[in-house]
Amino acid sequence: MEESQTSDTARRLLTLSWPVLVPLLGAFVALQALSPGGAASATARSAATFLPPILIAAAGLLAWRFNRSRVVYVALTVGLSAEALSLFLPGGTQVQMATARAGLSMIVSLNLVVFALIQERGLTTTLGLTRFSLFGFEAVGLWSLTDPQNALMGRLLDTPLFALPWFLHPSLARPAVLVFLAAFLILLWRALTTRGAIEVGILGALLAAGLVLQPEASNTERQVYLAAAGLVLVLALVETSHSLAYRDELTSLPGRRALNEQLGQLSGRYALAMLDIDHFKKFNDSYGHDAGDQCLRFVSAKLAAVPGGGRAYRYGGEEFTVLFPGKTVSEAAPFLEQLRESIADSKFTVRAQGRPKKKPDKPTKAGPMKSVGVTMSMGAAEFGDASGAFDDPQLVMQAADKRLYKSKREGRNRLTFKG
């Protein structure tokens, strides 16, 4: 079971990280090709100029269309920071440019943390419009920081706050770098705890923006990293939309659409099990639908860790499916029995009525807690069995469903895979 959990976690991490890894690796490859003497053509070099704003704008438009206001704000933050930096490069003094970079780095870091933590709200609501005003205040603040009369502030932003050991670079103690590192840790924690593609995308946008604003970056590097930031946000939106289409929101398991597509792609033998929570309607009537949702999440966590290479799906309601590619039903049966026993041996604690969903600062009494047993009935069949009776995915599913109901008729909390 531990191997299955590790494999599922690895797949989930890969699914979440690819929208960040692909653009950043692509940026590295593009910079090699765009370097003096590189293999990039004249067309590719000119594309490096107009592609970044297109990708940033595409991210903002897609986010607006998908009602992802936080990504709109992130795209604006990254795009406007790059545009603001370009205003200081042609005619600004060295102090002004250093101050602009430091100020922009702090603005980007703080903004992205805020946008990762806030809830989604409509862009045209009062709160949404208020958030847009934040950019105006930040523009005024940046202009004030870069005023030649505020040279002292510029030096403070560019001066290390404390001494570091000899093996660490002094620039790590600069205020802007410290704020960036703090923002990175907060966004990393947020991405790992929520496992949301948007949160991972915001983390990737922070990394790309940090590369855009680094003092040593050339104009080509800034353009490539800005394009990477836009692509990170676009891919994060794509991954979010894919997850909504193929993954069940309540349980986080893949849904029926993902199951049907997987069945269409399999060739050769496989075992399929249909599973149903026993007496779930009675459970809902007794404890309420909120407790029912908690129970579904409890069972789903067990199913996600199914051993033997099985893949769990939410079929609908309290019914689930487990697929074992490459296994016969006899080979899959021991793993299904292990799963059934694991669920039956675990006690589900019903959340007391009035208990807060979040842990309060001070303990409160919200009524007695109650632990109840949860069991599941199962029926399994296989594709391509010796009789040739189940040579179609729908027939396999129907056979597994019939055996599921046979398990229920014979007393529940059991597996039937014959007859």
Image (tube, rainbow, N blue to C red):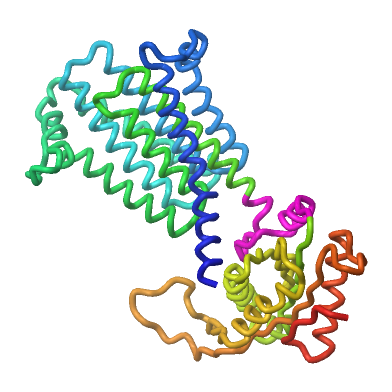
Q: Is residue 89 visible?
A: yes
In the rendered image, residue 78, in percent from the top left (x then y), is placed at 40, 32
Give the residue furthest to the top: 42
In the rendered image, residue 358, in percent from the top left (x then y), is placed at 44, 71
Residue drawn at (60%, 41%), measured in percent from left and top?
238
Quadrant where the N terminus is found in the figure: bottom right
Q: Is residue 335 above or below residue 390?
A: below
Residue 260 colored in magenta in the image: yes
Residue drawn at (42%, 48%), measured in percent from left and top?
116
Q: Tell me where residue 139 sits by quadrant.
A: top left
Q: Nearer the viewer, residue 164 or 41?
A: 41
Q: Tell me where residue 412 sits by quadrant.
A: bottom right
Q: Is residue 242 above or below residue 92?
A: below
Q: Is residue 231 left or right of residue 134?
A: right
Q: Is residue 261 above or below residue 323?
A: above
Q: Nearer the viewer, residue 38 or 187?
A: 38
In the rendered image, residue 316, in percent from the top left (x then y), is placed at 75, 66
Residue drawn at (60%, 71%), measured in percent from left and top?
307
The residue segment tinted magenta is: 243-267
Q: Is residue 189 above or below residue 75?
A: below
Total numbered circles? 0
Q: Is residue 23 left or right of residue 134?
A: right
Residue 342 colored in magenta in the image: no
In the rendered image, residue 74, in percent from the top left (x then y), is placed at 44, 38
Quadrant where the C terminus is found in the figure: bottom right
Residue drawn at (62%, 71%), measured in percent from left and top?
303
Q: Is residue 126 visible?
A: no
